[in-house]
Amino acid sequence: MQTTNYETILGFNPVSDTIGVRQVDVTPQMASMILVQLNKDNRKIVNSQVTKISKSIREDGWLEDGQPLTFNREGNITEGQHRLHAIISEDVTVPMIVVTGVTLDCFTRCAPAKPRRPEDEIQRKDKLAKPAEVSALRQLLSRRRGEKLNMKNAIEQWNFWKEDVRAGRDLVDDFFDSTTDFDPYERTFSAWAALCVRMGYKETAETLLSCLKAEILDDDSVSCLTREFIKYFKEYNWNMPAAGRTELIYQLLCVATDRLLKKPNGDIQLGVTPDKMNHTSLSNSGTYRKFLDDPDGIGDEPYFKDGFEPDN
């Protein structure tokens, strides 16, 4: 096809030696032509990315984010092929910024843009949000086994949980400033502490952290509960993968919380066995169950938005 025909169909000439910028209403027919005839110098298509964009169009419409459709000096598209596939899939006509005259192979030589993450989205809206706090939020949502942190829900989840997350971080700061035994699990401790704050178990969490700190630093055992907590973790974590050890720490924290709610002085056994230290068993009752997003597997419960209330 000659360039004059491109101009007739597209409304612009994709071949250019200089940078040109314009807005064009891209139809499915135009998208198809570009993909078939002007996509000879691009990376391999990723179908999952097309699916994500198509879903976004269905749910939120076409969002004008300013990301352009770019053509190099030979007229081949270099950015936007996944969006073009989604336009065809959803059969929509959308406005797009079109840039022509892009230097050949510039994407090979230029430093790539930093990928956006949920952390970036949160810190874009809340300049005071610390990386450790966002990390604790991610861990909290993971432990609840519900909706995971992503770009789309980052702001909503942060606004809902930030006060609890910050209070949880405050609770664990002194413990980790004074001890190192559980340093690899700081995010998990922070997530558990934040959930305790939300549930009204702040004092219980403070007590457990204080007793664990004393158990680690003092020569004599402080309480039966914390002595067995540390002993159990050391005995059963050694052959676990990292994810398994993190899961075990969280489970132990939840069980220890239950025990302290019964005996606030810690004069109580941990009382667990390996066959009971798993999600299936622990989700039947206690703190572990209360912290879950959907303990009964109903599939439509809110994430603590309406139905979750503190115990006190």
Image: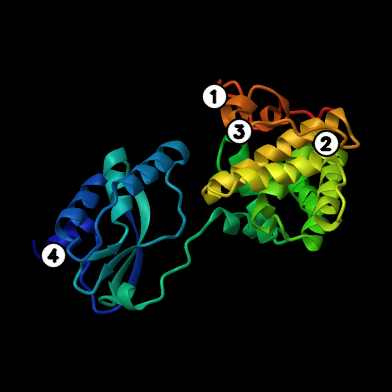
Q: Residue at x 20, y 49 (%)?
A: 32
Q: Is residue 257 above or below residue 240?
A: above
Q: Amino acid at mark 2?
A: Tyr
Q: Quadrant of residue 225?
A: top right
Locate the C terminus and report the quarter of the image it occupies: top right
Q: Residue at x 20, y 56 (%)?
A: 34
Among the two numbered marks 3 and 4 on one chain, the one whose residue lies closer to the N terminus: 4
In this rendering, the label closer to the viewer, 3 or 1? 3
In this rendering, the label closer to the viewer, 2 or 1? 2
Left or right side of 114 for 294: right
Gap between marks 2 and 1 measured at Cα: 26 Å
Q: What residue does disc 1 label?
A: 299
Q: How is the image coloured?
A: rainbow
Left or right side of 31 for 280: right
Gap between marks 1 and 4 measured at Cα: 55 Å
Camera sees residue 91: no
Left or right side of 156 for 75: left
Gap between marks 2 and 3 measured at Cα: 26 Å
Q: Is residue 225 above or below residue 8?
A: above
Gap between marks 2 and 4 measured at Cα: 72 Å
Badge 2 marks a residue whose secondary structure is loop
Q: What residue does disc 4 label?
A: 4
Outermost residue toward the left?
1
| Pointer 2 local density, CA inside 10 Å: few below 14, some 14–19, many at least 20 | many
Camera sees residue 247: yes
Among the two numbered marks 1 and 4 on one chain, the one whose residue lies closer to the N terminus: 4
Q: Nearer the viewer, residue 101 or 137?
A: 137
Q: What residue does disc 2 label?
A: 201
Gap between marks 3 and 4 measured at Cα: 74 Å
Badge 3 marks a residue whose secondary structure is helix
